[in-house]
Image (cartoon, rainbow, N blue to C red):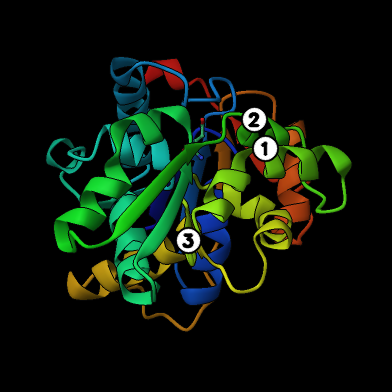
């Protein structure tokens, strides 16, 4: 048993989709979350920059003695899949757990993947799926406007702007008759209702945050690192810009009051 926290990071709010599921799946685990709100978005930056940011994010978490690092970020997972070698603690990104679920759940072998531009250009999900099953057809679409919508709290399924942007990005996948769509950026589950409204109930949407939370639980257990205490765990939140906006949207998304619950750090020091 290990009571140290699980360290989770993302470029901003997106990784909260993993935290939300971790709180459900592992209520007794402690969590430390870092959202790099001062440098979001990562998805349209170069590989080198994304890797440097990811190392700084992980170093901050390691300094807080986390027992595992979770890159709850499709972009980092796609561009820096080998981060674990540098960390010295178990590590996961979101690509692997999400692909396993798509391979298991798709009936017609036609899978859509949506993600940031860096994620889609890396073909990380497509490569992983086709390595396991070359008969799968994978249709990729980047959705660069989704992250700014989420970071600005424009997430209501009935908002005409949300509906329009969803249609713009999802229409090609709908026409391709996919039966499964991987929400390959952790910001996207926050728009899941709007995406589901457009794709229809027959299309399965795979939440990268949820699959990653379940996979994290498995890795902890396999490594004898689970926290088996009966006490409810704590969650601490850090960001690299002023916390106000993060607190507001996190309160909505996690359905709990986050006011004065988020601290600002200087990530350039790590
Ligand atoms: N939530 C992230 C991802 O999964 C980051 C998006 C971004 O910063 O562009 O890709």
Disc 1, disc 3: CB below 8 Å?
no
Which residue lies most toward the left here?
85
How many numbered marks have been drawn onto this rendered protein structure? 3
Q: Is residue 256 above or below residue 228?
A: above
Which residue lies most toward the bottom here?
230
Q: Is residue 41 left or right of residue 191?
A: left
The residues bearing labels 1 and 3 have C-alpha atoms spaced at a distance of 16 Å
Q: Secondary structure at mark 2?
A: loop
The residues bearing labels 2 and 3 have C-alpha atoms spaced at a distance of 22 Å
Q: Is residue 94 left or right of residue 235?
A: left
**Percent position (x, y) of residue 196?**
67, 62
Q: Which residue is mark 1?
A: 168
**Percent position (x, y) of residue 23?**
54, 68
| Numbered circle sitting on residue 97 | none
Q: Secondary structure at mark 1?
A: helix
Image quarter of the N terminus: bottom left
| Numbered circle sitting on residue 145 | 2
Image quarter of the C terminus: top left
Query: Which residue is nearer to you in this view: 88 or 121?
Result: 121
Q: Which residue is mark 3?
A: 178
Sequence-first disc among 1 and 3 = 1
Sequence-first disc among 2 and 3 = 2
């Amino acid at each position: 048993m290990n009571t140290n926290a699980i360290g989770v990071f993302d470029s901003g709010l997106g990784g909260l989709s993993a935290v939300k599921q971790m709180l459900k799946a592992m209520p007794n685990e402690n969590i430390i979350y870092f959202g790099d709100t001062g440098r979001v978005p990562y998805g349209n930056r170069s590989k080198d920059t994304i890797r440097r940011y990811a190392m700084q994010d992980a170093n901050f978490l390691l300094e807080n003695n986390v027992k595992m690092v979770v890159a709850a970020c499709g972009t980092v997972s796609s561009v820096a899949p080998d981060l674990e070698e540098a960390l010295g603690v178990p590590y996961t990104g979101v690509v692997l757990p999400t692909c396993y679920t798509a391979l298991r759940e798709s009936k017609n072998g036609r899978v859509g993947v949506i993600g940031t531009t860096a994620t889609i250009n890396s073909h990380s999900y497509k490569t992983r799926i086709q390595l396991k099953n070359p008969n799968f057809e994978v249709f990729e679409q980047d959705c660069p406007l989704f992250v700014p919508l989420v970071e600005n709290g424009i997430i209501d399924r009935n908002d005409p702007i949300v509906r329009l942007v969803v249609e713009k990005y999802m229409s090609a996948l709908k026409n391709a008759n996919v039966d499964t769509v991987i929400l390959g950026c952790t910001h996207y589950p926050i728009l899941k209702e709007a995406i589901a409204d457009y794709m229809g109930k027959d299309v399965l949407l795979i939440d990268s945050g949820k699959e990653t939370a379940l996979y994290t639980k498995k890795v902890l257990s396999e490594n004898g690192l689970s926290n088996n205490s009966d006490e409810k765990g704590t969650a601490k939140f850090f960001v690299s810009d002023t916390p106000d906006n993060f607190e507001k949207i996190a309160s909505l998304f996690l359905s709990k009051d986050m006011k004065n619950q988020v601290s600002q750090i200087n990530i350039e020091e790590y």
